[in-house]
Image: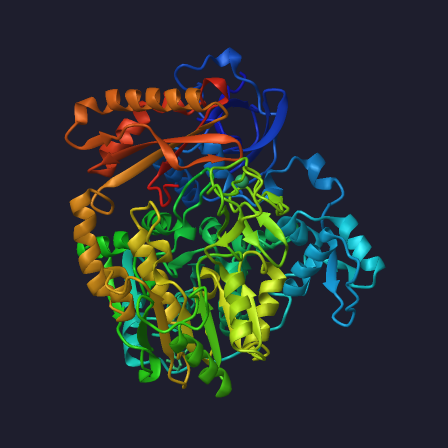
Amino acid sequence: MSAPPRFVQVAVPVPVDGLFTYRAPDAGPIGPGFRVKVPFGPRRLVGLVVAEPTDAPPEGVEAKTVRPVAEVLDDAPVVGAAELRLAGWLADYYLAPPGEAYALLLPPRMTKLEDDAVAPLKGLTEDLVRRLPDAQDTGRLGPKMLEALAWLEDAGEATLSELRAATGLGRDVVKRLEARGLVAIEQQDVARDPFTGTPVKRDEAPPLMPEQAAVVARVSTALGAYHGFLLHGVTGSGKTEVYLGVIDAALAAGKGALVLVPEIALTPQLAARFRARLGERVAVQHSGLAPEARLEQWMRIRSGELPVVVGARSALFAPVKDLGVIVVDEEHEASFKQDTSPRYNARDLALVRGHLQGVPVVLGSATPSCESWANAKAGKLELLSLPGRVMARAMPEVDVVDLRTAPVADAERLFSLPLVEAVRAAVDGGNQAILFLNRRGFASFLLCQSCGSTLDCHACSVTYTWHRRRGRLVCHLCDQVRSRPATCPSCGADALSEMGFGTEQVEARLTELLPGVRVARMDRDTTRGRALERLLGRFRRREIDVLIGTQMVAKGHDFPNVTVVGVLLAELGLGFPDIRASERTFQLLTQIAGRAGRADLPGRVLVQTYTPEHYAIRHAIHHDTLAFLGQELPLREARGFPPATFLALFRLTGKDPVKTARAAEELARALREAAAPHVASVRVFPAQPAPIERINHRYRFQVLVRGAKRGVLHHVLSETRPRWSRGLEGGIHVALDVDPLTFL
Ligand code: ADP
Ligand code: ZN
């Protein structure tokens, strides 16, 4: 008697809705968590079996049309049941293609076809370009060579691909610079891990402050079951020590831990602190890891050899053995939300994983998000507080500099006299300063003073940003670069002037105002990967007096000699068309102010603003998160925004503006029909052009849907799923963002 047929549901890593049914071999082990090689259209792909085999295909699938699995790749499941459930939850809640959700569970190497895996590994060594500081003969260089050189002067050294990503310039330009003796090109092993390649001195935990000890004790008693905590601790209150204490407790109980941090590449110091304490037991996951290294780490995490995983959002899916606790640091950060499909929020999913696996979850922040605060008020999260800094250090004193009345130091009104004087005093006293402005580039845009037109990117509905050092106009949306025209392209007048300012101009002004002060700039233009690490190292060794940067400088750094922090223009983010503009501004200002006075030296923060009375600025100045949230939450509720409601945003993009607009209207109509039985709780807003109407030649429209409850919103979205999940006619692309964090 022959065995009954077996059918399996397979998640195939493609952006297509649904699971796919295949026929399993009649004999041999197969089940949830096994990888299989399957035919998919004309291709073969590696998919993941997500459920137990059944003896009949699901309803609506004819047995004779089902294709067989080409090969079962494992003889035991490689992915555990808990992780499978997490990915299934993600696909369902975010209405994301299941294949993309399940793909998060495996390192890329494990979904490669064998033929690929044995192919020679490309990209393992890569050329490193280094500026030779002694070579100064830069006469008679072409504009491209000058641009590459200017960029390298900031970066120090970089891989060719980093240079290309930042400037669009390639090997030919670098070769010419090498021929002139200005740069050196070296072979470099990029697999060398910036986080684990350098040895870290072991250190011991300091005795915890009583407040820290109380928090660690409370969380430790919760090990073994799900419990959500919101740890609100002011900047410098010692939250990281608390996390380490909680992890210790988990390890002592024979369990592992997951620590999610925003943008780990920006905070090598945090990773170093974990390694210094936990040594070889911690896996640090970051985007710079080569695929082989990621696979190796994944294996060692899975075997229990590395019980602690520290990483950015994707680390949430790490196969930690006997998970004991999950920590999400800086839980308010938008970078926990993935902005490409599947658009999940790792902070929210951390709570789901905690639920599914019965482990406590700690969300920590100095500036909790409105969502988490509302959850704490509703009793869904238990609030824990660290109200003061460690060692009774003072919170930095924050002074407002009202730019409407303050004496200014430069014609562009970038610097007030008090700010310049404070920076001078810090540097004269042998200390350091950080200056913050959330806009890169030199000038925001070029304006013709004769005809009034601006220099706009031809692919996007925004102006180019002028980067003086590079001598280039750059589109910050599509990264397109062009040279600066001598005269206005619209009217021909010689009247192009630079409007607005960015970090590059702040750097130039400060160098004029305080000659001799060593200034460096840190933003997306100058600083990635290794260059960032080196820049932070130079600042830490006090080879730099003043660090100027965008929000990158606000992120969790701990520099003991920084006594002055200056904010150039506090309200810069308030004009954004975003329901969270005030919240973001409050969080950024509070975080940046927290960079001052973190060691034994008192710190001072100067906030320049034209609107000191705005509540986001006022409460940040007083480090008063409770007052801010107390004002923001009722406003959100009155306006019908999250966390009082739940949102989903459809983004439609297409080459033809009329067709794309029409498609958006049709989608809105379909959504409205589906929402009709729930008029009281679901609202579909009219289709609209997105705030940025065009990016990269594609027109953008959006449809916003709001629900009073998650459940009914989800129901309406699911009902219409067949209408949008396969894309629309005419090459119009539709993306759904559940719980969106950006509306641009
Ligand atoms: P947060 O993450 O809350 O901003 P950190 O954990 O970075 O704060 O702590 C701020 C500083 O205080 C760090 O330099 C840290 O090493 C130090 N610190 C934390 N806890 C203690 C403690 N119990 N005793 C002494 N120093 C501590
Ligand atoms: Zn553009």
Q: Can the viewer see residue 125 in this picture?
A: no
- Classify the position of the C terminus by image quarter: top left
Q: Horizontal and vertical percent for residue 497?
A: 52, 52
Q: Can the viewer see residue 387 in this picture?
A: yes
Q: Is residue 687 above or below residue 571?
A: above
Q: Horizontal and vertical percent for residue 519?
A: 56, 73
- Give whichever of 526, 47 is nearer the camera: 526
Ligand 1 sits in quadrant: bottom left
Residue at (23, 25) in percent of width and height: 675
- Give whichever of 219, 735 is nearer the camera: 735
Q: Residue 539 vs residue 176: left or right?
A: left
Q: Residue 435 vs residue 136: left or right?
A: left
Residue at (50, 30) in percent of width and height: 698
- Give whichever of 45, 511 is nearer the camera: 511
Residue at (51, 79) in percent of width and height: 203
Quarter of the image for residue 604 reads bottom left
Q: Horizontal and vertical percent for residue 318?
A: 49, 51
Q: Residue 22 vs residue 366: left or right?
A: right
Q: Is residue 389 above or below residue 182?
A: below
As drawn, the residue found furthest toward the bottom would be: 429
Count of labels in the image: 0
Q: Horizontal and vertical percent for residue 109?
A: 62, 43
Q: Is residue 272 above or below residue 495?
A: below
Q: Residue 352 vs residue 35: left or right?
A: left
As drawn, the residue found furthest toward the right would be: 179
